[in-house]
Image (cartoon, rainbow, N blue to C red):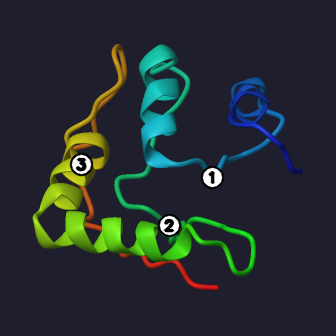
């Protein structure tokens, strides 16, 4: 069964229409926070993936975006942002995980 959004997938899980839902960690913590008696998260991720920026071929934005990414990597800003939003962040009313996995963020724009 496929869903285009997390909400209907989680509702199908709560209703017993599906046995499991694959969802990102932060969204999952939010849903567990609202329905802790009906949902639980795995302690370790089953999959990780890299995300990226997309530009039209030949875009003049590629070089400045790569330069900005290099700058925030070099001065530690990317690590601070990552820690704030993907390690320490707990949505209001959500559950926390007892085990975490460190993910290395790598970002480079290519054409």
Residue sitting at x 47%, y 77%? 63
Depth check: give the residue in front, 84 or 35.
84
Confirm or deny contact between disc 1 and disc 3 (CB under 8 A): no
The furthest residue to the front: 60
Residue 90 location (% of width, % of height): 29, 29
Helix, strand or loop at disc 1? loop
Please name the residue that numbered disc 2 is placed on: 46
Earlier-in-chain disc, 2 versus 1: 1
Helix, strand or loop at disc 3? helix
Local crowd size for mark 1, using a 10 Å CA cut-off: few (<14), some (14–19), many (≥20)? few
Depth check: give the residue in front, 82 or 41.
82
Mark 2–mark 3 Cα distance, whole angstroms, equals 23 Å
Confirm or deny contact between disc 2 and disc 1 (CB under 8 A): yes
Camera-near label (2 vs 3) is 3
Please name the residue that numbered disc 3 is placed on: 81
Local crowd size for mark 2, using a 10 Å CA cut-off: few (<14), some (14–19), many (≥20)? few
Depth check: give the residue in front, 41 or 94.
94
- Can you say which quadrant of the picture contains the C terminus? bottom right
Residue sitting at x 74%, y 71%? 56
Q: Is residue 83 visible?
A: yes
The furthest residue to the right: 1
Helix, strand or loop at disc 2? loop
Indicate the quadrant where residue 59 lies.
Answer: bottom right
Q: Up-down: is 87 above or below 29?
A: below
108 with respect to 13 (left or right): left
Q: Up-down: is 35 above or below 51?
A: above
């Amino acid at each position: 069964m496929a869903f285009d959004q997390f909400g209907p997938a989680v509702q199908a899980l709560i209703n017993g229409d599906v046995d499991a839902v694959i969802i990102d960690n932060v969204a999952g913590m939010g849903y567990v926070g609202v329905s802790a008696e009906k949902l639980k998260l795995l302690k370790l991720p089953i999959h990780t993936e890299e995300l990226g920026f997309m530009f039209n071929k030949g875009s003049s934005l590629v070089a400045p975006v790569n330069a900005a990414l290099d700058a925030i990597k070099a001065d530690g800003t990317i690590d601070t942002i990552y820690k704030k939003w993907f390690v320490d962040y707990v949505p209001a009313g959500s559950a926390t995980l007892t085990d975490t996995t460190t993910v290395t963020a790598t970002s480079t724009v290519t054409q």
